[in-house]
Image: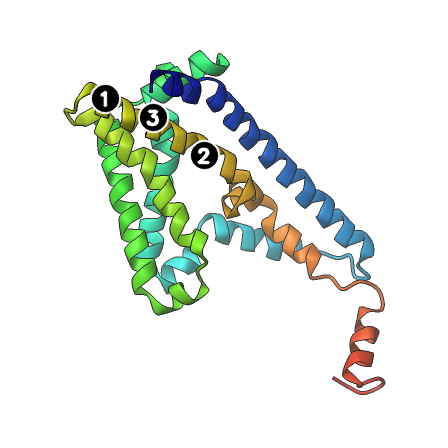
Amino acid sequence: MDSLLEFAKGPLFRFSFAVMILGLIRVFILSLINGFEAKSKAKDKVIPKNFVTKLTLGFILPIRAFRVKPVYSFISILFHIGLLLTPILLFDHALLFDNSIGFSWLNISLSGTIASNLTLFTISAGILLIILRISDKKSRFISRKQDFLWPLLLLVPFITGYVCGNVVISPLTYKTFLTIHILSGDLIFILIPLTKIAHCVLLPISQWITARAWKFVPEAGENIEKILGKEGQKL
C-alpha cells in the first residue's frame, strides 16, 4: 500500500499532469488548424465577429441557460466553481505540486475549515446535478454514458478527500482512501483531454470554430442540388 501510494503521488502524478497539459495543448492547436482549414476551403470567408463574440460570451456566462433551466444551470455553475477552486487552492494539493513539480501557491491556499465546507458544497451540488439529469426525460434522452459517469468520477476524489481530512478512521483505511483519492485524481488528469471536458480550453474559440465549420466549400451548393435532383430549381 505504501509503495502504491508513493507511486501515485509521485511518478504517476507527474505523468498524468503532463498528459493533461500536453493533451489540452494538442486539442487546442488541432482545433485552430481545423478552423483555418475550413476557412481556406470555404467560398464565403466572412465571419460575423460580433455574433460569434456574443455567442461565446453566452456560453461563458450562460444567461440563456438560466432562462431555460434556472435551477439546473445555477447548480451546475456552483459545481464547476467547486471543482476548480477546491483542488487548486487546497493546501495539501499545493504542497503536492510543490514537492512533485517544484511549483505551488501555498501562500494563497485555503484553510482546512473553508476547504472542508467547499468540498461538502461541491459534493452536494454534484449529487443534485446527477439526480436532476436522471429525473429529466429530455436530459436522459440526449445524455451519453459519460455524461453520468463523469460527475460520479469527479466526486470520487472529493468524497475520499473529505473522509481523509475529517473522519476518524484507522491508519489502513486512511491509506486506502488516500490512495483512491490520488489515483482517481490522476485518472481524471489523463481523461480530461480525451473527453468533452477538453472544452475547458476550447470554450474561448468554440464558437469561432463552429462559424468556420459551417461555411460551405466551393461548389457545395451545386453538389447538393445534384444529389436532390433540383438542379436549376429554386430551393
> Which of the two discs, 1 and 2, labels the residue nearer the N terminus?
1
Q: Is residue 72 left or right of residue 101?
A: left
Where residue 77 appears, x then y in whole percent?
36, 47
Q: Residue 187: which disc? A: 2
- SS of the residue under disc 1: helix
Kind of residue at disc 2? Leu
Q: Find numbered disc 2 in the image and state the secondary structure of the residue it sits on.
A: helix
Give the alpha-carbon distance from disc 2 to disc 3, as whole Å.
12 Å
Label disc, if present, on residue 179 of the rendered structure? 3
Q: Residue at x 43, y 19 (%)?
A: 7
Residue at screen point 82% across, 74% down: 223
Q: Give the number of the disc on residue 69.
A: none
Could you say which quadrant of the image residue 141 lies in? bottom left
Q: Report how far apart the C-alphas of labels 1 and 2 lie in the structure.
A: 22 Å
Label whose residue precedes the other's in the sequence (1 or 3): 1
- State if disc 3 and disc 1 touch (CB < 8 Å): no
Sequence-first tag of 2 and 3: 3
Q: Quadrant of the N terminus?
A: top left
How busy is the neighbourhood of tag 2: few (under 14 within 10 Å), some, or many (20 plus)?
some
Q: Nearer the viewer, mark 1 or mark 2?
A: 1
As shown in the figure, which amino acid type bears the numbered disc 1?
Answer: Leu
> On the image, numbered disc 1 is attached to which residue?
172
Q: Quadrant of the C terminus?
A: bottom right
Q: Residue 68, how many percent across, how many down?
A: 38, 64
Would you place residue 60 above or below residue 9 in this image? Answer: below
The x and y percentages for residue 5 are 37, 20
Left or right, 165 with reference to 79: left
Q: Nearer the viewer, residue 34 or 99?
A: 99
The answer to whether residue 109 is seen in the rendering is: no
Q: CA distance from mark 1 to mark 3?
A: 11 Å
Write the residue at 81% across / 52% down.
40
